[in-house]
């Protein structure tokens, strides 16, 4: 297999060296080569550069599956107790994620690292250069803050997945390899930068006109800050951010119908605080069929790519819980026959949440127009219940927050009088049911600390190899070969 240079710094170095070599052969400023100083001239250039930052979330520079909508979800859901690989999946790296036997050379772990830094590089370029463009100052400030929001989001993913990571904040200016290799920064230092970026982003607009729907807002920045503070167990700071979101006049609310969270017709709606944008047949390769099922035929022997870890995932839901029918399916309507095909095998029910049922035929899901929600209001309500419980126990406000989510699901209010520990467990169970396939479960297990993550996974027979080392993913082997300053996480060779 041909090895591809994917380390973010080495990748940029390759471009810089190529450009420098071309200049020596041709002229000092060849018109065929566009560098930052040549590109960033107009307001249109500034907008395009930040649009490119957003594009790092829903596309891949090499035409691979995107970070959101596939790669990140594949990593954290397969490594949780929600999911396991399909029996028909022959990719050993995907299978290793599903059974907790992944190693530093795992290509999927490498791909997520690469895509996160690719987006950070784009954000750094925009942040460094947009202020120098001849354009409206208010617009330039907004664009820089949008880029900082995404940089904060990407670093938040990195630091939770890998621990200490290289902190790169500017576009490289040197072709000297020694200047480009960066050591891992301490987790605390990375979090300081995330908080600084997101704090600046809280000055973004509360909302946008129709043409700009989906861009980062101040509400999204406050929400992500709240999640950062919750992860750090900084409860008073988290509560302050959550109160801002809930009481700050943003207009967020739950959709009355849970299904509407995952519909094209209701995208960027009242519950969507920040979503990665996808549209049908516009090149954003939202591979949601890999999050749900293949739909390649109505053959009941066709297996989906990802399936629930076991029946217990489905059985978390009571029959009255309306989230169950949105999260799973065991039959598909065949328009050719006018009948439903019922799947009956050991691997059903399948995941259903991200299927775009407006597409015809259904096997065209690779160009689905269903957005991928990164933060939605249900997350804020459940975080609020968790934070209040950690500060003052399960008071009326904490119960009210979790019961709003339960009421939407058409299930009874949580039983009053729970201890703080029992209430916390109820919140995490509610989060699991609410966010299956949305990339929350692995993070939720790990941030609880102790043996919570290991104990949860060991309940799944296929994941018995899990150990405490798995609370972090390994630093990809290829990155360490390219950058000898990178150390490895404990437990990985």
Image (cartoon, helix red, strand yellow):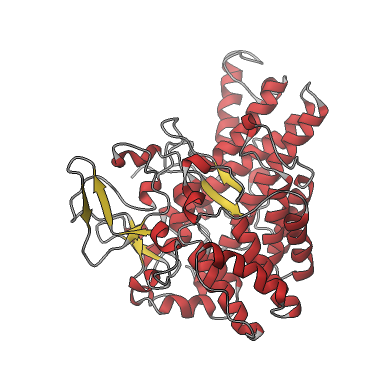
Q: In this view, does 360 lie above or below 492?
A: above
Place of residue 398 in the rendered image (x, y in percent of width and height, measured from the top left):
68, 72
Kindly tell me whether residue 473 is visible in this rendering. Answer: no
Q: In this view, does 18 lie above or below 119?
A: above
Residue under the point 71% across and 75% down: 396
Q: Is residue 419 left or right of residue 328?
A: right
Q: Position of residue 418 (x, y in %)?
A: 62, 85
Q: Residue at x 50, y 53 (%)?
A: 481
Depth check: 415 or 140 in front?
415
* Residue 75 percent location from the top left of the image: 46, 58
Viewer-side residue, 32 vs 307: 307
The residue nearer to you, when weighing 278 against 61, is 278
Along the horizontal axis of the image, is 409 left or right of 29?
left
Residue 57 picture quarter: top right
Does residue 138 appear left or right of residue 109 in this picture? right
User: Is 339 situated above or below 420?
Assistant: above
Q: Position of residue 110 (x, y in %)?
A: 47, 52
Q: From this viewpoint, which residue is outermost toward the right?
A: 137
Q: Residue at x 69, y 46 (%)?
A: 149
Is residue 92 in view?
Answer: yes
Q: How many marks?
A: 0
Quadrant holding the N terminus = top left
Closer to us: 41 or 244: 244
């Amino acid at each position: 297999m041909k090895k591809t240079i994917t380390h973010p710094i080495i990748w940029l170095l390759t471009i810089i060296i190529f450009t420098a070599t071309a200049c020596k052969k041709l002229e000092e400023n060849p018109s065929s080569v566009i560098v930052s100083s040549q590109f960033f001239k107009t307001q249109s250039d500034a907008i395009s550069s930040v649009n490119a930052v957003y594009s790092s979330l829903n596309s891949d520079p090499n035409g691979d599956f995107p970070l959101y909508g596939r790669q990140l979800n594949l990593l954290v859901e397969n490594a949780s107790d929600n999911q396991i690989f399909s029996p028909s999946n022959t990719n050993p790296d995907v299978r290793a994620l599903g059974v907790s036997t992944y190693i530093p050379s795992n290509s999927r772990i490498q791909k997520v690292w690469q895509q996160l830094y690719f987006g950070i590089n784009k954000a750094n370029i925009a942040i460094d250069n947009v202020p120098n463009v001849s354009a409206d100052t208010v617009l330039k400030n907004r664009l820089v803050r949008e880029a900082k929001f995404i940089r904060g989001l990407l670093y938040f993913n990195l630091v939770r997945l890998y621990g200490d990571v290289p902190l790169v904040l500017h576009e490289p200016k040197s072709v000297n390899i020694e200047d480009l290799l960066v050591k891992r920064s301490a987790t605390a230092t990375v979090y300081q930068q995330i908080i600084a970026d997101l704090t600046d982003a809280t000055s973004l607009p509360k909302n946008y006109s129709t043409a700009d729907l989906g861009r980062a807002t101040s509400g999204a920045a406050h929400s992500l800050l709240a999640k950062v503070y919750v992860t750090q167990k900084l409860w008073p700071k988290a509560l302050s951010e959550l109160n801002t979101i809930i009481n700050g006049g943003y207009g967020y609310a739950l959709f009355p119908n849970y299904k509407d969270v995952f519909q094209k017709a209701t995208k960027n709606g009242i519950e969507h605080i920040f979503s990665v944008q996808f549209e049908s047949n516009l090149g954003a390769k939202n591979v949601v069929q890999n999050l749900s099922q293949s739909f390649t035929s109505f053959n009941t022997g066709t297996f989906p790519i990802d399936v629930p870890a076991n029946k217990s995932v489905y059985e978390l839901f009571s029959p009255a819980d309306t989230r169950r029918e949105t999260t799973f399916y065991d039959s598909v309507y065949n328009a050719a026959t006018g009948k439903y095909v019922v799947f009956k095998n050991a691997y059903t029910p399948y995941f259903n949440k991200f299927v775009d049922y407006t597409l015809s035929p259904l096997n065209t899901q690779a160009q689905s127009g269903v957005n991928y929600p990164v933060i939605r209001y249900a997350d804020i309500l459940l975080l609020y219940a968790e934070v209040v419980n950690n500060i003052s126990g399960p008071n009326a406000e904490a119960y009210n927050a979790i019961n709003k989510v339960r009421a939407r699901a058409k299930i009874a209010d949580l039983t009053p009088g729970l201890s703080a520990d029992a209430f916390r467990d109820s919140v995490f169970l509610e989060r699991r049911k609410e966010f299956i396939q949305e990339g929350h479960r692995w993070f939720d297990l790990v941030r609880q600390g102790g043996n919570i993550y290991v104990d949860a996974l060991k309940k799944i027979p296929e994941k018995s190899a899990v150990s405490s080392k798995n609370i972090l993913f390994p630093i990809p082997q290829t990155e360490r070969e390219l950058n000898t300053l990178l150390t490895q996480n404990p437990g990985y060779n």
